[in-house]
Image (tube, rainbow, N blue to C red):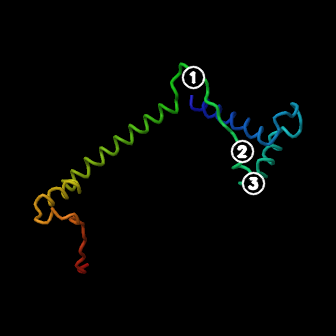
Amino acid sequence: ATAAVQQSVADRLSRCIVTELHLANLPEGDPSTDSEHLHRLIKQVTPDQWHTFDCTMPKEAATDEPNVEELEGKTLRAEARRRREEATRTRHQIWGESWQEKVDRVKAASPYSHYASWRLTAVMVKGGDD
């Protein structure tokens, strides 16, 4: 199904480019409509010209089939969420409390926590004994 969606998008983009290059009204079989000629024309388009193209891509008609891109996106988001949660658990197993938990714990015990400028900063001290 993904290949079909990609082909549909490619077809719509091709039609857009042909329209913008003013080739849409050429008769079938005209030498300027062959793919090699189109490739040469496309290669000659400057970046400034690409920005002037007005290719509004209409949405495809709704179908009863689920949107493959949407399903893949949901699956990818679920996988990303699962990985974040696993990374959080792993960090907690290795270092114990999170940085924010440590900040909260130290701030609660600090006699200076009422100052607006109070911050907890991590510092590494190297002893030069390597």
Secondary structure beneath label 2: loop
Q: Is 67 left or right of 109, judged from the image as shown?
A: right
Name which of mark 2 and mark 3 comes first in the sequence. Answer: 3
Name which of mark 2 and mark 1 comes first in the sequence. Answer: 2
Amino acid under label 3? Answer: Thr
The location of residue 11, given as percent across then percent down, is 69, 33
User: Which of labels 2 and 3 is toward the front?
Assistant: 2
Q: Which residue is disc 1 drawn over?
A: 62
Q: Which residue is disc 2 drawn over?
A: 53
Disc 3 vs disc 1: Cβ atoms closer than 8 Å? no
Q: Quadrant of residue 23?
A: top right
Secondary structure beneath label 1: loop
Give the camera-side residue of 42 and 3.
42
Secondary structure beneath label 3: loop
Mark pair 3, 1: CA separation = 36 Å
Disc 2 vs disc 3: Cβ atoms closer than 8 Å? no
The quadrant in which the C terminus is found is bottom left
The location of residue 102, given as percent across then percent down, is 18, 57
Q: Residue at x 78, y 45 (%)?
A: 39
The location of residue 12, given as percent across then percent down, is 69, 34
Q: Which residue is disc 3 drawn over?
A: 46
Q: Quadrant of residue 30?
A: top right
Q: Residue at x 24, y 70 (%)?
A: 123
Q: Which mark is residue 5?
A: none
Give the camera-side residue of 56 and 79.
56
Amino acid under label 2? Answer: Phe
User: Which of labels 2 and 1 is toward the front?
Assistant: 2
Q: How dense is the environment of label 3, judged by Cα within 10 Å: few (below 14), some, or many (20 and up)? A: few
Q: How dense is the environment of label 2, judged by Cα within 10 Å: few (below 14), some, or many (20 and up)? A: few
Name which of mark 3 and mark 1 comes first in the sequence. Answer: 3
Q: Residue at x 83, y 44 (%)?
A: 37
